[in-house]
Every structure is written in structure tokens, then in C-alpha cells.
């Protein structure tokens, strides 16, 4: 393997927000320690009418993880697919890495890879956090298969995605994972006590606070969590729920459910995209992070929770259960089962009351599961495979 291996990465970078751009920034920063890395960014991601959030851009004022990038690819403009491919052809990289996260980009990714020289097309690896979106339909499946047609191989970020890719394409699949996202933490740590932070969120210092964090969509299962919390509150009136994240659908049904369940005083909702500099206070104010998802492969929220060394409650979907050591780093519930979720929440509460050291167990567990730490070695194997 030569010393000066060139890797060109195609995907969203800063100033775009959300999971893919955060992941690619971590990836590029890690790879550049051993390889020559260039990131090609988008000029246009989604058209405005297709994006359900307030903005596609990260307006955070701090805690930004970025990587220098060249903005030249538009998901909507085929001319840029050709010009970007020509740019890549001219650079003649040893590996072309393309991030895949949504079927909408199927035509763009097919066009881009189709315009690559045949010799370079043989070096294309798609990174896949999800193969097909959580709300997939037949068109999503078609767009996904089209977009990923020209992959030489894949890098899957979970075992579930690895198996799915192998059934769809019968091509080589390498494995890694999401990194542990600990960049939201202040370098000197949090100077405000959890007791004070709970008061800032209008909770009592003795409340057990569960956190639901991130974008709200149906597959995230927030309604199931509300039902479980209502049952738990009847037995333990001191528990509270903090919901922090932008709703990509109307929040009215959730607020109506909260009222119907008679738990308005126990739930606080902040319907907004949480900027990076504010993330820490939500996690420090909470005792446990809950991911009651109906479907998932893995979760960036779990990576953030572990970054803060917070225990979690997850449902047994995708890779989530494999990323939790039961009774030590968190608890696992059956999916779409409010009774099972309520039991998992209650199990956390009991364990916490015993003074269990979740932080120490999480730190030990991360030493076993953090595959991202080996990403440079993984790309050495990818290089040898695509240049064989």
C-alpha cells in the first residue's frame, strides 16, 4: 500500500446540519491522520418543499466539528453530477467514498457514479448508515437500488445494514460504526450542577428526568414513550420527561395525548433544533436517555448519550440492543410495547436508586464496541480490495 493514498469523500459537510454531516466530519478528520482526504460537499441538498425542518443549515455558534470541503454537487442539477465526476476523474483518487442516507439522492448518486471513468468506478465505496429510509415505500426501494448500483463495495455502520446490503447487492460489505459523539461537552466539563440544571428546566432537584432527544418523526415512537410515562407516573409521581428536538410533523397530536393522559405537569417540550452549544445542558439535566423507536439501524442519539456517559433505554430494533449492556449501560424494551417500555424505565429507576455506577460501566463497554476507532485500518482493507 503506497504512503500517499488519496481518498475523495462525497457527501454533506458544514454548513449542513444533522447526522450525515456530523459523521462525515468525524470520518474525514480521522482519515486525514493517515491518508490524503478531500471532501466534496453539496451546493443543494433538499429542495425547500421537501425539507420538513426550519432550516437545512447548522446555525450553531460553537462545538462545531467540521472539515474543509468543496461545494459543487447539487442533488437537483444533472450538470453538476457530470462536472463533479469530471473533477473526481481528474484527481484520480485511490478510493471514492460516497455517503448514502436517503433514497431521494438515488438519481444524483447514480448519475455521478455513471459519469466516472470505469477504472475509478471500481473504487467506489458507499457508506451506509441506513440502506432504505425508515418510512420506505416501493419508490424508495427503487431509488435506493438505482443509487447504489455502481458501488464496488460498501461500508456498513451496523450489522443489520450489513446483512441487508448483502441480500440486496451480493457485494463485499466492510463494517464500522458511528463514532462516540463527545464533542458537545465543554473541555473543562459542565460547571453547572445537575440540580441547578433541573431547576432551569422547571423540574425539582429530586425528579428523575428521562430525555427524548432529536428530530421527532413517527418512527421515533414518542407516542409510545408518552403512554409508558403515564403508567410510570401513576406509580412514581417524581419522574419527568424532557422532549428536546424539532418536530418534523405537527406537535399537536403529542400535546393532545399529554393532556389526555393527564401528565402536562410532568412533561416539558422544546420544539426546536437544539444548537450544538446548548446540547450539553439537556443531557446533564437528565438521568437517562430514551430511544423508543419503532424502527432503526443504530442511532446518533445513542452515540451522543454515551458521549455524555448517560445510560439509555432503547427498543430492540436494528442494532440498538447490541449497543446496550443490559442492567449496566442501559435497558432494552420490546418495540411498540408501552408496557415493556414502562418496565425498562422502571428498571433504570430502581438501579439508580441503588447508587449504581452507570458511568463506569459505559466507559468499560465503549472499549469493546467502538469500532470507529479502527476506521483507518478498515480503509486500508478497503484500499486493498478496490485496488486489487
Image (cartoon, helix red, strand yellow):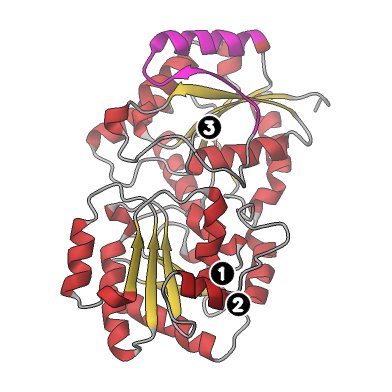
- Which residue does the image show at 57% across and 43% down from the upper left? 61
The residue range painted magenta reads 67-90
Q: Is residue 79 magenta?
A: yes
- Residue annotated with mark 2: 358
Position of residue 364 measured from the top left corner of the image (x, y, whole percent): 69, 70
Whether label 1 touches label 3, CB < 8 Å: no
**Label 3 environment density (alpha carbons within 10 Å; few <14, some 14–19, many ≥20):** some
Report the front residue among 74 and 286.
286
Q: Quadrant of the N terminus?
A: top right
Q: Is residue 225 left or right of residue 254?
A: right
Mark 3–mark 2 distance (CA, rounded to whole Å): 35 Å
Classify mark 1: residues with Cα within 10 Å, few (<14), some (14-19) or many (20+). many
Q: Give the label on residue 162, or none.
A: none
List the single residue furthest toward the right. Answer: 3
Q: Residue 15 got which mark? A: 3
Q: CA distance from mark 2 to mark 1?
A: 7 Å
| Residue 310: mark in rendering | 1
- Whether label 2 touches label 1, CB < 8 Å: yes
Secondary structure of residue under mark 3: loop
Amino acid at each position: 500500500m503506497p504512503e500517499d493514498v488519496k481518498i475523495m469523500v462525497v457527501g454533506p459537510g458544514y454548513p449542513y446540519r444533522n447526522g450525515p454531516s456530523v459523521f462525515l466530519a468525524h470520518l474525514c478528520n480521522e482519515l486525514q491522520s493517515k491518508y490524503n482526504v478531500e471532501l466534496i460537499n453539496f451546493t443543494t441538498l433538499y429542495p425547500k418543499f421537501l425539507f420538513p425542518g426550519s432550516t437545512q443549515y447548522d446555525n450553531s455558534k460553537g462545538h462545531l466539528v467540521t472539515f474543509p470541503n468543496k461545494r459543487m454537487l447539487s442533488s437537483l442539477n444533472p450538470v453538476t453530477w457530470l462536472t463533479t465526476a469530471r473533477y473526481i476523474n481528474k484527481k484520480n483518487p485511490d478510493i471514492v467514498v460516497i455517503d448514502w442516507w436517503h433514497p431521494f439522492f438515488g438519481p444524483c448518486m447514480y448519475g455521478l457514479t455513471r459519469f466516472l471513468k470505469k477504472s475509478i468506478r471500481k473504487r467506489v465505496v458507499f457508506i451506509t448508515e441506513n440502506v432504505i429510509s425508515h418510512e420506505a415505500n416501493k419508490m424508495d426501494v427503487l431509488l435506493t437500488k438505482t443509487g447504489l448500483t455502481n458501488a464496488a463495495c460498501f461500508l456498513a455502520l451496523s450489522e443489520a445494514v450489513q446483512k441487508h446490503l448483502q441480500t440486496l447487492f451480493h457485494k463485499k460489505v466492510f463494517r464500522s460504526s458511528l463514532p462516540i459523539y463527545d464533542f458537545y461537552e465543554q473541555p473543562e466539563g459542565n460547571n453547572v450542577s445537575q440540580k441547578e440544571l433541573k431547576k432551569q428546566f422547571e423540574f425539582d432537584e429530586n425528579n428523575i428526568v428521562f430525555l427524548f432527544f432529536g428530530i421527532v418523526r413517527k418512527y421515533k415512537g414518542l407516542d409510545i414513550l408518552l403512554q409508558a410515562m403515564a403508567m410510570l407516573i401513576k406509580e412514581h409521581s417524581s419522574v419527568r420527561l424532557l422532549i428536546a428536538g424539532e418536530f418534523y410533523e405537527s406537535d399537536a397530536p403529542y400535546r393532545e395525548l399529554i393532556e389526555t393522559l393527564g401528565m402536562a405537569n410532568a412533561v416539558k417540550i422544546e420544539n426546536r433544533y437544539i444548537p450544538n452549544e446548548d446540547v450539553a445542558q439537556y443531557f446533564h439535566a437528565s438521568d437517562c436517555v430514551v430511544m423508543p423507536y419503532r424502527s432503526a439501524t443504530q442511532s446518533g442519539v445513542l452515540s451522543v448519550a454515551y458521549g455524555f456517559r448517560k445510560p439509555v433505554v432503547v427498543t430492540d430494533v436494528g442494532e440498538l440492543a447490541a449497543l446496550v449492556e443490559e442492567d449496566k449501560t442501559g435497558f432494552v424494551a420490546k418495540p411498540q410495547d408501552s408496557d415493556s417500555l414502562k418496565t425498562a424505565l422502571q428498571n433504570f429507576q430502581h438501579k439508580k436508586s441503588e447508587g449504581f455506577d452507570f458511568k463506569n460501566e459505559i466507559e468499560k463497554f465503549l472499549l469493546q464496541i467502538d469500532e470507529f476507532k479502527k476506521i483507518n485500518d478498515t480503509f486500508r482493507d478497503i484500499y486493498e480490495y478496490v485496488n486489487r
